[in-house]
Image: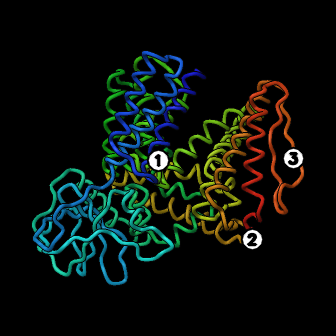
Amino acid sequence: MKRQSNNLILLLLFQISGILIAHHYPFAMPNLLFAFCILLLSFYIFPELFWMAFGFFVVALSAHHTKDSYPKEIAHTSEQWRVFFIEEEQKKTAKFYKYKATFEQHQILLFSKIPLVKNAFYLVKSHLSEVENFNSTFDYKTYLAKKGIRYQLWITTAHYLYSSKKLKSRVKSQLQTISKNHLPEHLYGFTQTLLLGDKKDLDPLVLSKFQYAGIAHMLAISGMHIGLLFIMLERITLWFNKEIQLILPLSILWSYAALLGFSPSASRAVLGISIWLFLKYIHKWTSPIHILLLTAFSSLCFNPYLIFDVGFQFSYSAVLGILLFYPLLNKRVLFENRILKNIAQIILISFCAQLGVLPLSLYYFHLFPSLFLVSNLLTSPLFPIILFTAIGMSIFPNLASLYIRSVELLFQVVNWFDSQCWSYFYVFQVSKLHVLGMYIIIYQAYLYLLFQSKNEIYSLYIPKKIGPWYQYFYLKCKQKPLLYIIRGAITLLITVLFSERLPLIY
């Protein structure tokens, strides 16, 4: 089992290395052919170097795939008549309506002076231009290219042709109509975010309050949403045969993922459940870590630029934190009372997930919610009621009153946490090297808990300050010589990272 985990980790690291190399440096097809020749030679001549050559080949293959996934160039961008399909509306700018559109399988950013209808085809006469950076502090062109968008256009008029008859468009429109007819205006944006992942109409103040309370994951369709939906489907199909228990939940879950546009977090959860159900069906079992690594590898094969997506990074980091730390910490929960034990488990899961995303949260949002354990404990029992009533409301509109009361109660809890001045604090000046250093420290803490649970002799030390503002901790191993090398490398790395003044916290 350990060897399989190591092989999967190496394979994923080779793949990510290839993506990063292709993103930052030029890469040509001859490099891939050269790597393939080395792989063949090592297999027949130097079998002991096979893994090294295989890693080189995976890096080269991943780099080539990443370059090939970059948005293609459009041959003719001059002014002419074109037909565009309006996929979704984005947040409106000061003077233009902003839409994500498609043209001949190319994704386009479309700015319009007039409002357009979503899921509809329009005839437009305009020229295309490549996205340009509007300031020197943010590389907007590269940011959109990672999302598959390379071109943009501005229009003042458009000729409506017809609306899409696709099932996905009709389902989305039906859900939006039900929400508008049965919910107050201030809950419409929240409901669209909860069910469809569409944050366009979500009040920014509501989003910030959820972030300050440490429960922003409720506003992103992630593993918790998909997991609750799967539990409901599993209970419904409990009395059917194994084939239906496999096919029906997967069909509904993948249909829901398609409705969401295969967002990274939802796709990861559905793919993980699919692998788990398939292994259960054929009476095989593997570690949850293996499933997580396989889903990450498969997702990056489908779209290499997902590695730069913040949702992708947060989703996998949170789940990895839970899978690594929760089993070790749960062994230390000694409550005999079932209620107290369940409360402790909810707190542990929240803590492990927050530990996994902490460096990324400080890097991207410069924010740490200090009351996230309490807020998750209070809102976790309420969230399944909100999610299931929101789903049931699309079939039974009478559930709208229960849904409204549940959401209003959730908002009261969130507002209370937001009103506490000590519920969060900001952290500034967090760089990528700081993130790497923090993850190394978290991994060392994991090793300490892992080997301590095996009754091996490991010690946790807090030595003197390296720099004027920082104290660090590391592990000293008295049995494994390899960890002496790891400890020395980490000591050197942290010395470099934190030799200057650390982020100010207030």
Looking at the image, residue 74 sits to the left or right of residue 8; the answer is left
Is 129 or 194 nearer to us in this picture? 129
Q: Which mark is drawn over residue 506?
A: 2
Tag 2: amino acid? Tyr
Numbered circles on residues, count: 3
Q: Which mark is drawn over residue 66?
A: none
Residue 162 position within the rendered picture, expressed as x and y whole percent measured from the top left? 11, 64
Looking at the image, residue 337 sits to the left or right of residue 60; the answer is right
Looking at the image, tell me whether mark 2 or mark 3 is earlier in sequence order: 3
Residue assigned mark 1 = 21
- At label 2, counting other C-alpha atoms closer than 10 Å, the crowd grade (few under 14, some 14-19, many 20 or more) is few
Residue 370 position within the rendered picture, expressed as x and y whole percent measured from the top left? 71, 60
- At label 3, counting other C-alpha atoms closer than 10 Å, the crowd grade (few under 14, some 14-19, many 20 or more) is few
In the displayed structure, 431 sits above or below 506; it is above
Tag 3: amino acid? Ile
Q: Secondary structure at mark 3?
A: loop
Of the two numbered discs 1 and 3 in the rendering, the one whose residue sits closer to the viewer: 1
Looking at the image, tell me whether mark 1 or mark 3 is earlier in sequence order: 1
Q: Which mark is drawn over residue 462?
A: 3
Residue at left 67%, top 38%? 325
Is 200 or 14 nearer to us in this picture? 14
Q: Secondary structure at mark 1?
A: helix
